[in-house]
Amino acid sequence: MNKIKVIQFGLGPIGIESLKLAAEQSWLEITGGVDIDPTKTGKTLSELTGVPALAGAKVFPSLEALFAAVGAPDVVLHTAGSSAAASFAQMKPALERGISVASTCEELIFPALKTPDVAKEYDALCRRTGARIAGTGVNPGFVMDILPICLTGVSREVKSIYVERVVDASTRRQPLQAKIGSGQNPDDFRAKFAAGKAGHAGFQQSVALLAHAMGWKLDEIRESCEPVVATSRVVTKFFDVAPGQSLGIHQKCVGLSGGETKIKLDLQMYLDASLPHDAIVVKGRPNLNLVLNGGVAGDDATVAALINIIPRLLAGAPGVRLMTELAVPSWRNPLG
């Protein structure tokens, strides 16, 4: 069986972990990486990851440079941003060549919500070239959208969907702890959230995907976010948070139809959060109530979602694809 050739675009913490997991898969071949950081250009992926098997693959400053040096892969693994418009632009050189893209970009979970014209433009491009691009991940991409959608597969009627996620951010990577406002003045964090520069990305897209799957037409999507404030000192590997400073976020998003709340997402992500869990409540026939004690570990599982989507992405129709348009995600034997 021919191996699927992949490259990694974006060599931050998630990109590095993506490479490590991809290197364990006998059905994948890693041919290179791309990052805009000039200090990484020319290095081997082995130097960046510590994986000896990646000694023959190098880092290039652009997709064009990589394609010219090692040829085109089958799939680009993209872990370099939250904006759908920016991610489409970054991936244009690949999509123009018919190369498919699996991305952790949060807005790509439902790109038509904020950038309908851009999504339509790139969907047409992909259909012409035979490429596919889809967003995946844990949240968005699984816990607060795909998993509840799957649960409704046994429903005769669905009246509303509620998803709650409590995450102990102390166990997460530094960029995420920073993004949720760890150690910041609460008022400063509120201002950053209002400006779209803080908080958890992709919330509204998850609501839109849920509504799309249920066939609900929403009149409005409302999102809010408040900092969780420390009452005592909290120390992590990356932050020393004093009382009165922000520990993280309590972010909510609701989808309304006819004045009725059809979808409600509630995310509490902060340092030292107690009793982390994911919970889904579907009101309908039957009523469904699912709790994942401990929750889904975001960083680790995000990388798994990215790798696991590859075969389903390549089997999908060309275009800008939603997770609901691909086969049900699942693990694949790394030796298979």
Image: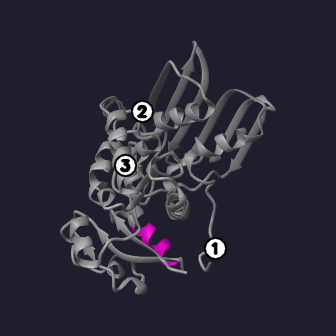
The residue pinned by badge 1 equals 333
119 on left or right of 172? left
Seen at 36% across and 39% down, the residue is 120
- Is residue 290 visible in this depiction of the protein? yes
The x and y percentages for residue 144 are: 58, 41
Q: Nearer the viewer, residue 10 or 128?
A: 128
Q: Quadrant of the C terminus?
A: bottom right
Q: Nearer the viewer, mark 1 or mark 3?
A: 1
Task: Report, in whole angstroms, how far the alpha carbon at label 1 lies from the one at label 3.
Answer: 35 Å
Question: Dot 1: within a 10 Å radius of its alpha carbon, few (fewer than 14), some, or many (20 or more) residues?
Answer: few
The residue pinned by badge 2 equals 113
Seen at 52% across and 78% down, the residue is 24
The x and y percentages for residue 335 are: 61, 80
Question: Dot 2: within a 10 Å radius of its alpha carbon, few (fewer than 14), some, or many (20 or more) residues?
Answer: some
Task: Report, in whole angstroms, how far the alpha carbon at label 2 lies from the one at label 3.
Answer: 26 Å
Question: Dot 3: within a 10 Å radius of its alpha carbon, few (fewer than 14), some, or many (20 or more) residues?
Answer: some
In the image, what residue type sits under mark 3? Ala
Q: Quadrant of residue 33?
A: bottom left
Q: Earlier in the sequence, mark 2 or mark 1?
A: 2
Q: Is residue 127 above or below residue 73?
A: above
Q: Which range of residues does the magenta coloring cover?
A: 16-24
**Magenta highlight on residue 256:** no
Q: Quadrant of residue 71?
A: bottom left
Q: Quadrant of the N terminus?
A: bottom right
Query: Disc 2 on helix, strand or loop?
Result: loop
Q: Earlier in the sequence, mark 2 or mark 3?
A: 2
The x and y percentages for residue 171 are: 51, 57
Which label number is shown at residue 178? Answer: 3
Seen at 57% across and 52% down, the residue is 326
